[in-house]
Image (cartoon, rainbow, N blue to C red):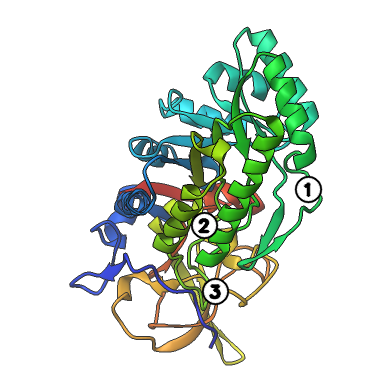
């Protein structure tokens, strides 16, 4: 038997022993959606995460949602009532906000390789464009000239550190993301001279982390480095985007991130920040941490087979919908996501089984040699921590299988 990740504490069994998601049984949700496979997102959990963040952080730290984590429109509409802004990285994500009637909310358009049409649309939408290179800064200015609107532009700085498995290593590393710190004052001066609305700096290492001390060190180094850049520029920094990095516990042995510890450390860092950051507005962009635990992937058992003494449960879902749970279809059994038999959620484990998807690859495994209650054909398997980087981050077109359904409750 191999371990699975911890089932988020938000979930419990109802009187009948079935898993409850937002107060509904899986059978009710599947019936409402019209079948499986099905992603269900509980807005109560998302709302609770937003409240936890705002309750822990000091006043004035903005919370932006990273649309890449999950661009499901009803979820965006829900989040639009509670977050302070959004992060997008493509014209497609910008369009999703517009379709959700959220285009008037503050937006940060980040990411490398922005097309000219994306820069133009970002300017029209009033988004802050986080430029990733000196060339992109020039193209952003030219795009704004074509549109005839003063652009809002921030500069992404290559961070002076790396963070891997919770460990922070000081020193810059070559990266396609951002501009080296020694060039930033020159770029900022050029932006100001060009008449743009310079919005500040964006500094983000891009690593998911569950270690509060590691994130605290990242924030400390980021703020200190921003102060050095401000000194070099000789002016205050209007805004400092601290990026994200907050992970959720979904692998065996994971412990939840101590958000209160992160907040306390960040508050201490800001209280002792450089003088030129005294009036700076700070933003944190979160995706996975806000919505990851709110999602459950429901997939139905199609077949139960035995092979060489091992039991397999084959489902109608798989890695083409939730690639992260399979180890990106390149690993097997190393890091099982939390998994359960949804209609026997309150029952104790009875057997060790391997839960596979329907794809024609041996790597399409949702749960490798995991302990579960006995499941038969027709039962529902629930895979947790499926609210972020699920359907939109998976190879949905693989084998031309049907798309998964989605539902917000």
Which picture quadrant has residue 365? bottom right
Asked whether 205 or 143 is in front, the reply is 205
Label disc, if present, on residue 246 of the rendered structure: 2
Residue position for label 3: 336
Could you tell me which secondary element the residue under label 3 belongs to? loop
Q: Earlier in the sequence, mark 1 or mark 2?
A: 1
**Residue at the bottom extreme?**
309
**314 versus 55 height, above or below:** below
- Residue visible at 65% across and 24% down in the picture: 118
Residue position for label 1: 175
**312 versus 165 height, above or below:** below
Q: Earlier in the sequence, mark 2 or mark 3?
A: 2
Q: Where is residue 86 drawn, in percent x and y?
A: 48, 36
Report the Cα–Cα distance between label 1 and label 2. 21 Å
What is the total number of numbered labels drawn onto the structure image? 3
**315 sits to left or right of 180:** left
**147 sits to left or right of 291:** right
Asked whether 378 or 68 is in front, the reply is 68
Label 3, residues with CA under 10 Å away: few <14, some 14-19, many ≥20: many
């Amino acid at each position: 038997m191999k371990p699975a990740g911890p089932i988020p504490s938000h979930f419990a069994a109802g009187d009948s022993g079935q898993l409850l998601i937002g107060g509904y049984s899986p059978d009710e949700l599947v019936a409402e959606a019209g079948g499986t496979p099905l992603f269900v997102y509980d807005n109560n959990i998302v709302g609770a995460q937003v409240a936890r963040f705002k309750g822990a952080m000091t006043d004035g730290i903005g919370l932006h949602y990273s649309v890449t984590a999950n661009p499901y429109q009803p979820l965006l509409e829900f989040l639009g009532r509670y977050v302070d802004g959004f992060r997008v990285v493509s014209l497609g994500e910008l369009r999703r906000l517009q379709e959700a009637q959220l285009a008037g909310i503050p937006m940060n358009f980040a990411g490398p390789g922005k097309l000219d049409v994306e820069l133009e649309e970002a300017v029209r939408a009033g988004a802050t464009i986080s430029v990733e290179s000196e060339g992109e800064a020039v193209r952003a200015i030219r795009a704004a000239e074509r549109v005839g609107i003063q652009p809002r532009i921030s500069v992404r700085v290559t961070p002076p550190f790396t963070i891997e498995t919770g460990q922070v290593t000081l020193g810059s590393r070559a990266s396609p993301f951002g501009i080296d710190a020694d060039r930033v004052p020159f770029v900022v001066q050029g932006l100001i001279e060009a008449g743009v609305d310079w919005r500040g700096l964006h500094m983000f290492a891009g690593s998911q982390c569950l270690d509060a001390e590691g994130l605290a060190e990242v924030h400390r180094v980021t703020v200190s480095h921003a102060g050095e850049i401000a000194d070099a520029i000789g002016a205050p920094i209007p805004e400092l985007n601290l990026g994200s990095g907050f992970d959720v516990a979904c692998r065996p042995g994971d412990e939840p991130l101590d958000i209160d510890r992160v907040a306390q450390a960040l508050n201490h860092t800001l209280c002792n920040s450089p003088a030129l950051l005294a009036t700076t507005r700070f933003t944190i962009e979160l995706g996975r941490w806000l919505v990851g635990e709110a999602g459950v992937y429901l997939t139905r058992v199609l077949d139960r087979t035995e092979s060489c003494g091992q039991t397999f449960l084959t489902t109608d879902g798989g890695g083409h919908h939730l690639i992260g749970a399979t180890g990106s279809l390149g690993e097997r059994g190393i890091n099982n996501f939390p998994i359960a038999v949804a209609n026997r959620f309150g029952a104790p484990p009875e057997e060790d089984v391997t839960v596979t998807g329907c794809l024609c690859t041996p790597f399409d495994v949702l749960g490798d040699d995991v302990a579960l209650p006995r499941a038969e054909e027709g039962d529902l398997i629930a895979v947790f921590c499926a609210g972020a980087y699920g359907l939109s981050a998976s190879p949905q077109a693989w084998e031309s299988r049907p798309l998964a359904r989605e539902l917000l409750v």
